[in-house]
Image: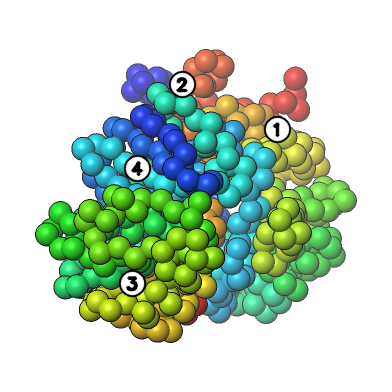
Amino acid sequence: MISKKLTVVSNKKLADGIYEMRLSGADYVVPGSFLEVTVPGFYLNRPFGVGNYEDGEITIYYKVVGNGTDKMTEVSVGTKLNVIYGLGNGFNMERAIRPLLVSGGIGIAPIYYLAKAFAKKGVRPIVVTGFRNASEVVLSNELKEIADLVVCTDDGSMGFNGNPVSAVKALDKEWDYYYACGPMVMMKYLKMYSDKGELSLEARMGCGFGACMGCSIITKSGYKRVCKEGPVFDADEVEL
Amino acid sequence: MSTVNNVLDTQIELFGVKLDNPIIPASGTYGFGYEFSEYYDINCLGSISLKGTTKEARYGNPLPRIAECPNGLINAIGLQNPGVDKVIEVELKKLDEVYKKPVIANVGGHSFEEYTTTVAKFNDVDKVFAVELNISCPNVQGGGMAFGTNPDTVEELVREIKKVSTKPIIVKLSPNVTDIKLLAKAAERGGADGLSLINTLVGMRIDLKTARPIISVKRGGYSGPGVFPVAVNMVYAVKEVTDLPIIGMGGISSAEDVIEMMYAGATAVMVGSYNLVNPYGCKEIIDDLPVVMEKLGINKLSDITGRSHNV
């Protein structure tokens, strides 16, 4: 864990309600880890999955879901934000030979970084990304270059007509292990279909570094904190 | 700053134990302490108040347990802890490896028997120099705060606990009462050795989209800088009616806040919510304390307890 002021080098809208913020001055962080941003005027820090790391720069992708994320859209380039990064565990990339990556909504952030990390290792993953509709679809062009991509929308306005789990079931490509991040309902049905994978969970957090027990969940091996022992858990470990 | 440290005395005394400074992370905001040693050497702390401990292990409340507020947060953790036996056998041993000073155990419960059994288990634990009774937790059904809002119950509970405990007993008072002084006096009559205040204020947030309370169990305890003036007032009020040592808490986020709380009547202070937004919070306050003391012309910190009452 590192607590540091990072400089906003870009903060722009990518799609309906979805933004990309790049922060410079950072150290390396592993795929699947998360960070917390102190949003000016708000008490609790906001947790975000890391969307990319390159050359001292962390990218986050965020969705406007409340006052805090709304305020973040107004942060201008050059602003120094207090960021606590290198939080949580991360994905275990060693477990897959033919990885399948699945995201729902803004869960695409850590999935995108993981896809980039696999690409760096010379592995071309299968990536399934799900969105509500075409206006929310992001990162397709970037992912197409490094992965076999299936985009799905709930309303069929782009790509596969249906949710990511249905798209996974309909895949004609082989995979041996999956990595997923998305809404709880997606994770639940994915886990029901197969528990050979890892789930990156989301939770309302107090601190984000293990102090408050605000995000504890029940697992097969006892109580675990999403922020500390997670956010990535073995699919067969968690009860959703 | 080292020269400043040499001339300025931050030491305080609590139940005959000398603490290097009055800064104590509040129960429930610092786990069992050892995990913070990943971030800095926690031996700078005056002491630590351990995560609330019950007789049996508790998972606590369902999620969400946290809701943000202006200048603070609402929590309804529900006393998640591994139970007193594991706290003593596992957690305290882990803490002892990285923290060499004595600590304060914090005990919660649903019944007199649960409290007395749990408190008594700390009698033989040398690492623990005092036990803080959480009789004011708003997040436990049928317990916690229910004990802390009735003066007769408080007096009787403290008396029963004093019969079985060999450690100084600190009673943690709830602000969710008509007159906190009555509860302070009740604890004193029961034999309390010290008081800590304030616990969180009961609060609720409602999601505008769903119209449902955000917290799973609807309400929780509000804490953070927003409650600081409430806490200062209550510490001041309690100091007027008792000579028991007071540990002041509620929204403390700076060395200046520490001084203000001590002026109001606190012998030591606890830092809570601030740990959750700044993992280095306690360390930064401790580093800053001599600087602020010098600025205010304070040479000996223990001199300032209750100063506001004499000016």
User: Which is more toward the observer, A190 or B258?
Assistant: A190
**Quarter residue B153 falls in:** bottom right
**Quarter residue B170 falls in:** bottom right
Residue A213 spot, x, y in % from top left: 51, 62
Q: Which residue is mark 1?
A: B264
Of the image marks 4 and 3, the number of the one nearer the N terminus: 4
For the question of whether residue B29 can be seen, the reply is no
Q: Amino acid at mark 2?
A: Val
Report the mark closest to the observer, 1 or 3: 3
Q: Which mark is residue B291?
A: 2
Report the mark closest to the observer, 4 or 2: 4
Q: Amino acid at mark 4?
A: Thr
Q: Chain of mark 2?
A: B
The residue shown at (56%, 75%) is B58
Q: CA distance from mark 1 to mark 3?
A: 52 Å
Q: CA distance from mark 4 to mark 3?
A: 22 Å
Q: Secondary structure at mark 2?
A: helix
Q: Amino acid at mark 3?
A: Glu
User: Is B66 located above or below residue B258 in the figure?
Assistant: below
Q: Amino acid at mark 1?
A: Ala
The residue shown at (16%, 73%) is A97
The residue shown at (56%, 16%) is B296
User: Which is more toward the observer, B280 or B33?
Assistant: B280
Q: Which residue is mark 4?
A: A59
Q: Which residue is mark 3?
A: A198
Q: Secondary structure at mark 3?
A: strand
